[in-house]
Image (cartoon, helix red, strand yellow):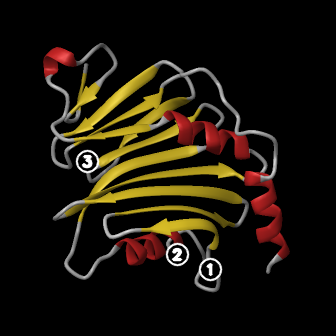
């Protein structure tokens, strides 16, 4: 086993209890096309960009060290959770590198995976539906495992019909519209 993988596992899971901070003020992003809403801590993730394909959002911390991407994607016939994870993880590496998987679980309609590439930890969580999937990707430097865990705790997805306009509050983005 690679020493960096052992060290990464220790950094991510070996410390005392998982950090816990009180819930932060949350913003809401909803996608009409992919039928999900995502709540994220606005006080931690201060930079927000709508993805060029308009299928989700990219969020960054003020210092730029941590990043979250929440997006929906069309599901092609030959795709499955493991192949989608591998394609995404390998897209973050050079051709001669492989991502170092720390822990993972794959099901027929979901996957969750912690992995490492270079000097970054990644957490992926994806949910699969008939013709699309929704994925949360969190990236944080290996010297900031607490940031990864805090973001993981505070980002929430809700599936089904996006929130109705009457339920939106200021700062919420529903179907690409900011309220």
Would you call the spot at circle 3 few (<14 residues within 10 Å), some (14-19), or many (20 or more)?
Answer: some
The residue carrying mark 1 is 98
- The residue drawn where x is 70% and y is 34% is 19
Query: Between marks 3 and 2, how big is the CA–CA gap?
Result: 23 Å
Secondary structure at badge 3 equals: loop
134 or 68: nearer the eye?
A: 134
Task: Answer with the quarter of the image where residue 116 lies.
Answer: bottom right
Query: Between marks 1 and 3, how big is the CA–CA gap?
Result: 29 Å
Q: Is residue 65 visible?
A: no
Do the numbered discs 1 and 2 sit on residues whose CB atoms are within 8 Å? yes
Q: Which callout, 3 or 2, points at the residue further toward the start of the chain? A: 3
Position above or below: 160 against 82: above
- The residue drawn where x is 55% and y is 37% is 153
- The residue drawn where x is 76% and y is 70% is 5
- The residue drawn where x is 16% and y is 64% is 130
Foreground label between 3 and 2: 2
Position above or below: 69 against 37: below
Task: Answer with the quarter of the image where residue 27 lies.
Answer: top left
Q: Which callout, 1 or 2, points at the residue further toward the start of the chain? A: 2
**Residue 171 location (% of width, % of height):** 34, 18
Numbered badge on residue 90 = 2
Would you call the spot at circle 1 few (<14 residues within 10 Å), some (14-19), or many (20 or more)?
Answer: some
The residue carrying mark 3 is 54
On the picture, is 151 further left or further right than 147?
left
């Amino acid at each position: 086993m690679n020493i960096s993988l052992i060290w990464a596992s220790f950094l991510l899971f070996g410390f005392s209890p998982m950090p816990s901070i009180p819930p932060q003020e949350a913003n809401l992003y909803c996608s009409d096309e992919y039928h999900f809403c995502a709540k994220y801590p606005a006080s931690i993730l201060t930079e927000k960009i709508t993805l060029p394909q308009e299928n989700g959002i990219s969020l960054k911390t003020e210092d730029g060290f941590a990043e979250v991407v929440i997006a929906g994607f069309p599901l092609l016939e030959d795709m499955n959770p493991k192949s989608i994870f591998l394609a995404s993880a390998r897209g973050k590496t050079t051709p001669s590198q492989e991502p170092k998987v720390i822990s993972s679980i794959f099901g027929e309609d979901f996957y969750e995976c912690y992995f490492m590439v270079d000097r970054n930890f990644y957490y992926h969580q994806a949910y699969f539906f008939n013709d699309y999937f929704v994925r949360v990707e969190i990236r944080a430097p290996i010297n900031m495992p607490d940031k990864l865990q805090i973001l993981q705790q505070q980002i929430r997805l809700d599936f089904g019909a996006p929130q109705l306009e009457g339920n939106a509050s200021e700062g919420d983005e529903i179907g690409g519209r900011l309220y």
